[in-house]
Image (spheres, rainbow, N blue to C red):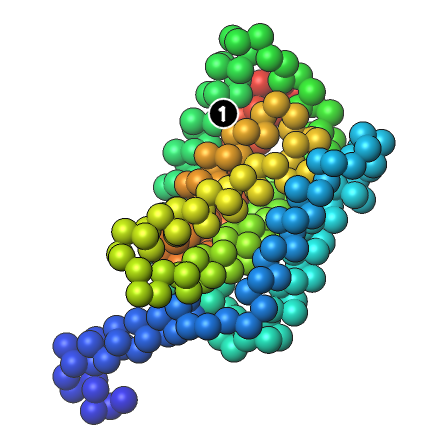
Amino acid sequence: MSHLNQYPAQAHSVRHAVNHEVLTYANFSNERLAWLAGLPIAATAAFYVLPETLQDCLAVQFIPQLLGFIGLGFWIFANTGALHRLGLAIHLLPQGLWWGGLTGLLLGSLNTAVILDWVPAHGWDITFLKETPHARLSPYLMVPWVIVGIAIGVELHFRGFVLGRLFVLCRSWRLNARVWRGYVQMALAVCISAVVFAWDPFMTQTFRHLHWIALWDGMVWGGLWVCQRNLYTVIVAHAVEVLFMYLNIRAALL
């Protein structure tokens, strides 16, 4: 190491090569049990064929996410370098704070305007937001503790596990294929994960007709993850966006 410090440019080149090797290994090598990401996807689809009485049950609404975290646990034990594969390498944190904070503020501003102005102007109700579990909790718990905790859990599941494993599977399908097909397959992974996120049972049952806002959130966050392979970015973006929306919508409705 002392030898490298005598040659800063050479040291930087070596570190860059090491980081590139880690990211390449983490995202493009063969993974074991990547197919487990299909469990929450299948469970989400199955939810919508259940009787309405079961769909109203809170425990049933969380089955897809529960299966996702169980699958995540098995996947972690079956693969090395789990933190790098998920996008949680510590050197990615500064990038995640910058891009996540900026993205969260932009999406938070957009979605707050949509909910408070555009949705009521088109005759849709938003007063039900006062009865959601988030509104019933003390704001001293929600800000920032519950919101940050939800952001970590949701992004670990939907972007880190579901999207990440779909991304790996899609990359494996593009062997000997044209380059543009790889981009199509990556876009497919982002779209599938965004739809699964927006139609998560708890999301649709709690936020009703507003759940489709999560679709473009999922597309943006998924696109960021695919471009950066950085889970810190989407965790911070999610937390900042929801904090912004929670404070402004709560002030307007409560």
Residue 115 x, y percent position in the rendering: 53, 21
- Closer-to-camera residue (21/33): 33
> On the rendered structure, is 153 left or right of 117?
right
Residue at numbered disc 1:
112
The type of residue carrying mark 1 is: Thr
Residue 77, percent from left and from top: 62, 75
Q: Residue at x 79, y 43 (%)?
A: 60
Task: Give residue 140's position: percent from left, percent from top.
Answer: 66, 39
* Neighbours of disc 1 within 10 Å: few (<14), some (14-19), many (20+): some
Q: How many marks?
A: 1
Q: Quadrant of the N terminus?
A: bottom left
In the shown orientation, is residue 183 left or right of residue 189? left
On the image, the x and y values in percent for residue 171 come to 40, 61
Residue at 62% x, 17% y is 126
What residue is shown at x 44% (from left), y 40% (from top)?
219
Taking the image as drawn, is residue 141 in sight? no
On the image, which quarter does residue 56 sit in?
top right
Regarding residue 212, the answer to whether it shows in the image is yes
Q: In which image quadrant can residue 51 be found? A: top right
Foreground residue, 50 or 68? 50
Of the pair 104 and 175, the residue shown nearer to us: 175
Instruction: Specify the farthest residue to the right.
Output: 53
Q: Nearer the viewer, residue 156 or 250?
A: 156
Please say if 100 is above or below 24: above
Quadrant in which the C terminus is drawn? top right
* Name of the residue lying farthest toward the bottom: 3
Taking 161 as reference, is 168 left or right? left
Residue at (43%, 27%) from the top-left corner? 110
Above or below, 218 against 86 in this view is above
User: Label 1's element?
Assistant: helix
Q: Is residue 57 above or below residue 117?
A: below
